[in-house]
Amino acid sequence: MIGISKLYCGTVEASDPLRYGRHSKRLPSHLLQFSKDKRPVVVWNVGQRCNLRCVHCYSHSRDCEYTGELTHEEGIRLIDDLAEFGVPVLLFSGGEPLMRPDILELITYARSRGLRAVVSTNGTLIDDELAMKLKDAQLSYVGVSLDGLEETNDRFRGIPGAFGRALSGIRACQRAGIKVGLRFTINARNLADVNGIFDLIRDEGIPRVCFYHLVYAGRGTRMTDDDLSHAQTRDVVDLLMDRTRELHNSGRPIEVLTVDNHCDGPYLYVRLLKEDPERAADVLKLLKMNGGNSTGLGIGCVSWDGAVHFDQFWRHYSPGNVRDKPFSQIWTGTDDELLNQLRERKTHLKGRCAACKWLTVCNGNFRVRAEAVTGDVWACDPACYLTDEEIGL
């Protein structure tokens, strides 16, 4: 996760996370990516069912009943373990998490155990009544997925009217006083809508937006031809910086982040080095604190059936199941060879990644994307858009 607004626009300085000792339990949410203890943010896919049919869905979700999901009692035990382990954030995801009947009880219980609770949703089920219930449950944040403006989004989501219903859900959250933001997965099908998304967040007063780079997982494995070229990726990251700066200069300090491609960090730094060398030096410190991709370290996932994954996209491999062993024991154990290798990934990386001068701020980027394309988990991430010269070759 690369904070465009934090780094490029200077809303966070290198001294800010240091004031809290960089300990995840003490850091405010906007500084969590700079923690040094790397207790994982955990994504819990509370159910596989979803009312939409998104073309890039990593969970292959459909609107039907699924069996084998963690029960309420098993979910409570999971939350207890995560709280005792010191997990700073529990992200309720799906499928569509708001379709789970006991979701409000689970959120309330997570908050009672001291976890920050957030929800990743398509937003289409949120009305004023549900928004107030989420507010009463002390939910910290609602991330609503939009993948374009109305026509693009509805085609991408597979359901006519999905955009309008999601926008209604966002407005209901705002009326209830819940912090809400957008999640947008960039690809060739919606690239032309990026500018419009910035206009939308400006006009609707939405305080946060996360732009995700495409990861080839679930239905997304069929979208490799829809991923951006390296040149397109560079152009869109420049656009994100330009529009973020424009909003900040106009008195709208919206939080803008990119996710799932840590090349964005060095790319931002190199651009800033030309524009503001003094600020660039501070940014480099923050990028080193961030540490790059933290799959298997700073982020983990528990699936609907209790299977643990290194992140929410690495669905084809699991080092264990919370029905058999607590998440904390799986996560800190040494029995799984691949998990051990991820902890020491710099010694296993190959090719350009192994020789890259930005390795300490990128950490090898996205391993699951490299594996999806090459069959080798330690090969170079094909989404790396930095040139040989830029990485020091």
Image (cartoon, grey):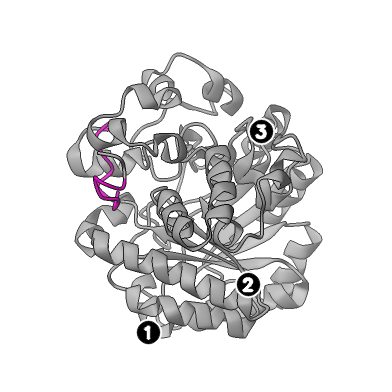
Residue 246 covered by magenta stretch = no
**Structural distance between the alpha carbons of marks 3 and 1:** 40 Å
Q: Which residue is mark 2?
A: 126
**Does residue 302 appear in the picture of this structure?**
yes
State which quarter of the image contains the C terminus.
top left
Label 1–label 2 contact, CB within 8 A? no
Magenta span: 377-390
**Helix, strand or loop under label 1:** helix
Q: Nearer the viewer, mark 2 or mark 3?
A: 3
Query: In this orientation, which residue lies closer to the viewer: 163 or 359?
Result: 359
**Structural distance between the alpha carbons of marks 1 and 2:** 21 Å
Label placed on residue 82? 3
**Helix, strand or loop under label 2:** loop
Q: Nearer the viewer, mark 1 or mark 2?
A: 1
Looking at the rendered structure, the kind of residue marked 3 is Leu
**Structural distance between the alpha carbons of marks 2 and 3:** 27 Å
Where's residue 311, x and y in %? 45, 40
**Helix, strand or loop under label 3:** helix
Q: Which residue is mark 1?
A: 151
Residue at 40% x, 67% y: name it. 238
